[in-house]
Amino acid sequence: MTKIEAVIKHTKLDEVKDALHEIGIQGMTVTEVKGFGRQKGHIELYRGTKYELVFRPKVKIEVVVANGLVEQAISTIEKAAKTGEIGDGKIFVFPLKEVVRIRTGERGETAI
């Protein structure tokens, strides 16, 4: 099993969710986050005053998939989240030792 975390633009969330659903990934956790990468924020002008926005608002999606779906899930997220502009985000992939469904006690891939 593998956990995939993707930090993407808010505007791409529905597209990513729908694309993952199409390949059979049914559950996900979504968190609103802030951060910065290489761009290190930017300066905006508001009522004649400059403000430096270092932390950009993003959405973090977390999904757990069987090992056989990892590459398909990664490419699906990448295609659905891509705008071609700076700040499209990142995908992080982690091996997952165990999953337990609290309600039933199921373990492993059946708990996903």
Image (spheres, rainbow, N blue to C red):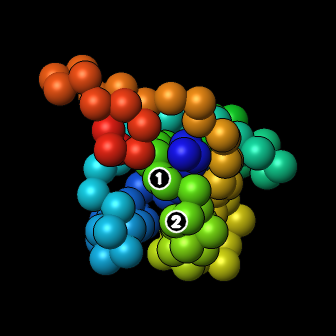
- Amino acid identity at mark 1: Val
Query: For the residue labelled by badge 2, is the local secondary structure a helix, a strand or a loop?
Result: helix
Identify the image quadrant of the C terminus: top left
Report the residue at 38% width, 68% height from top. 20
Image coords of residue 14 (percent x, y): 31, 65
Residue ranking furthest to the right: 38
**Location of residue 79 with respect to 21 vertically, above or below:** below
Report the residue at 52% width, 65% height from top. 69
Question: Between residues 21 and 30, which one lies in front from this camera angle?
Answer: 21
Would you name the residue on which mark 1 appears? 65
Question: Between residues 95 and 110, which one lies in front from this camera angle?
Answer: 110
Query: For the residue labelled by badge 1, is the local secondary structure a helix, a strand or a loop?
Result: strand
Whether label 1 touches label 2, CB < 8 Å: yes
Report the residue at 25% width, 23% height from top. 105
Q: Which mark is residue 12?
A: none
Image coords of residue 32 (percent x, y): 41, 37
Image coords of residue 6 (percent x, y): 56, 51
- Amino acid identity at mark 2: Leu
Q: Residue 69 carries which label?
A: 2
Question: Taking 47 as reference, is 74 left or right?
Answer: right
Residue ranking furthest to the left: 103
Question: Between residues 11 and 76, which one lies in front from this camera angle?
Answer: 76
Question: Taking 93 as reference, is 39 left or right?
Answer: right
Which quarter of the figure has residue 22?
bottom left
Identify the image quadrant of the N terminus: top right
Question: Can residue 47 be spotted in the picture?
Answer: no
Q: How many marks?
A: 2
